[in-house]
Amino acid sequence: MNSTKYLIVASLLLTACAQVPQQAEPVPSASAANAAPVSDPSGNDEQPDSPDQSATVQPSEADLPKQELTGALLYEYLVSEIASQRGYKTLAANGSEDLAIKTRDPRLAKRAAQLAFESGDMEKSVAAFKFWQEIEPGASIPSRMLASIWLRGGDLEQSKAEFAKVLKDDAANANETFLQIEQILEAYPDKPAALAMMRELAAPYPRMAEAHWSVARLARAAGDVSLALSEAKQARSLRPDWDLAVALEAELLQKSAPQQSLQVLRDYLAKHPSAYEIRLQYARVLVEQQQYPAARAEFQRVADHNPDNPDLVFAIALLSLQMNDLQGAETELKQALGKGKKDQDTVQYYLGQLSEAKQQDDEAIAHYREVKEGEHVFASTMRIAYLLSKHDKLDEARQILHQLQPANNLQRSQMVLVEAQLLRDAQKYDEAYQVLQQGLEQLPNHPVLLYETAMMADKIGKYDVTEQYLRKLIQMNPQDANAYNALGYSLLERNVRIPEAVGLVEQALQLAPDDASIIDSVGWGYYRSGKLDDSVKMLRRAFAANPDPEIASHLGEVLWMRGDKAEAQQILQTSLKAHPDNEPLQAVIKKLIP
C-alpha cells in the first residue's frame, strides 16, 4: 500500500479547513487533454483537491473554553511548534496533545491531530482525531481523516462508516463530499473493494449526480466499463449541463462506440459552445477517428479563444502535417516557436520533418541541428546523417553517427542498422558487413542485426555466415517465418540443395500463409524443382498480392520457360516501365529478350 499517498491526501484534508469557497462550483472543469474530469491521486497529480470551509462549522467565541493564556501554556505551545519546525515530530505531537487535553480548545485539538498524523504514529493519530471529534462535534474533518486513516490500514468498514457520517452530517454539501471521497478511494489499491464501498455510500443518494459520477469513476478504475457507463449516463441525466458527467460518458464510449462518443460531445457543444475544455476533448476524439480536417477546425476554435497558447498552435500544425498541408503546417509551427513553446526542440524537429517533405534538405538539416535535448535528439541525428549521405557526404554522416552516444540497446542497434544502410546505399557492401558484424559483437542475440548481417553476408558471398546466422535465428525463434524463407531463398538463388530449400520456404509459408514474398519463394522453389505449372500458380498468387518487380521477374521468367512468351514479355515490360532502375528485372529481361 502507498502510505505516502495517503499521508498527502490526509494532510490536505487537515490544512484545508480554514479555506473559504469563492465560487458555487468548487470542482475543476473537465480536462479534455486527458478526458479525466478530476485530478487523479493515483496518477501524475501529487494531491487531490482539498475540502473547503463548508465542511466544518467553525467554533464561535462563545463555544471556546474560558482558558487563561498563562506563561506555562504559551511556553508549552511554543516548544511544540518549534519542535515541529525543526523536525522533531514525536516531541511536537506529544506536546500538542498535552496542550489540547489541558485546554479542550478545538483549535488546539485540530493542531494536535495534525501533528500526530504528521508524526506517523497512526494510533496516536486516531486518538487525536477522536478527541477533536469529541470536543468539536460539528467538525467534519476529523471524520474524514479517520476514514482516510482506516482506509490506509485496510479497515474498510470503519472507513465507510466515517465517510457515511460525513455525508449525513453535512448533507448540504454531500455533492462536493462525494467528489472528495472519490479522489481518496481512487488511490486505494484494491479497486473492486473501493468500488463496493462507493456503491454502498452512494445508495442513499439516488438523485444526486455526483454520487453516480463517483461510482462511475471507480467502476472504470476497477475495469467494470458497463457499470461505469451506466452510472455516468445517470449522472448526466440528473445534471445535463455538468461538463464532468459529459466528459466521462464520452470517454467511456470512446473505444466501444466512438460515434456515440462524438455525438455526446457534439450535442453538449451545441448547447454550450463556450465549453472549450469539452471542445478540446471533442477535437482529440476526432483525431483518434482520423477526422483530421474536423479536428483541426475544433482545435482552431479553442486556439482562437486562447491565442497565447503555443501548445494549441502546435497541435494544429501537426494536424496540418497529417493532412499534407505543408504551407499551413510551416506557418503554425513557426507561430508555436514564436509564442515561446517550452519544448522548442520538438518544434524544431517537426520543422525539420516539414522541410524534408518539401525536399528542402539543407533547411531540414538546419532545423534538426537545433534539436539540442529531449526525446527527438536521437531521431534528429539519424535524419541529419541520412540527409548528408543522400548528398554524397557519407564520411561526414558516419562521423556524426559515431559521435552520438546511444542511451540504450535499442538506439545502439538503430545506429548500427542506419550506418549499414548508408553504406549499402553507397554500394560499399564489405564495409556494411563489417559494421553489422561489429554491432553483433555488442548485441550477439539481436534478431534484426542477425538477420541483416546474414543478408549482407549473402550479398558478398559469405554463404556459410548467412546460413549460420539464419539457423541461429530459427533456433532462437522456431516461428520466425522470415528466417526460414531467407535461408531457403538463399539456397534457391544459388541453385543448391533444392529439396532442402523448398522444404524451408514451404515451412515459412505454413507460418505466414499470406506473405507475398514467401509465396514468391515457394513458386521459385517449384521452378527450380521443374514444376512449372505449380510455380506459375504460386507466382501469379504472389504477384496479385504484391506487384513487386522481383516477383514480376520471377513470374516472367517462368512463363517464358513454359512457352508463354507473349504474356511473360508483357509482364516484364510493364513492370520495367514502373521500376526502370530495378536491377533483377533488368537482368531477367536482358537474359530472356535479347
Image (cartoon, rainbow, N blue to C red):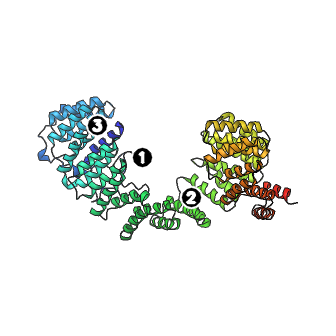
Q: Which mark is residue 44?
A: 1
Give the left or right position of residue 219, taking residue 424 as reference: left
Q: Which residue is mark 2?
A: 337
Disc 3: CA contacts within 10 A as few (<14), some (14-19) or many (>=20): some
Q: For the residue labelled by badge 3, is the local secondary structure a helix, a strand or a loop?
A: loop
Taking the spot 63% from the left edge, 57% from the top edge, the residue there is 353
Q: Is residue 570 above or below residue 93?
A: below
Report which quarter residue 259 is drawn in.
Answer: bottom left
- C-alpha span from label 3 to label 1: 24 Å
What number is the disc on residue 322?
none
Residue 3 % position (x, y):
34, 36
Residue at screen point 66% across, 36% down:
472
The three-letter amino acid code for the residue at tag 3 is Gly
Give whichever of 444, 295 is nearer the camera.
444
Q: Residue furthest bottom?
A: 270
Please identify, in this view, whether the residue under mark 3 or under mark 2 is nearer the observer: 3
Say which label, 3 or 2, has the lower sequence index.
3
The type of residue carrying mark 2 is: Leu
Q: What residue is pinned by disc 3?
A: 154
Depth check, front residue: 454 or 431: 454
Q: Of helix, strand and loop, which one carries label 1? A: loop
Give the residue type that dot 1 points to.
Asn
**Callout 1: 10 Å neighbours few (<14), some, many (20+)?**
few
User: Residue 11 location, x and y as percent?
Assistant: 30, 41
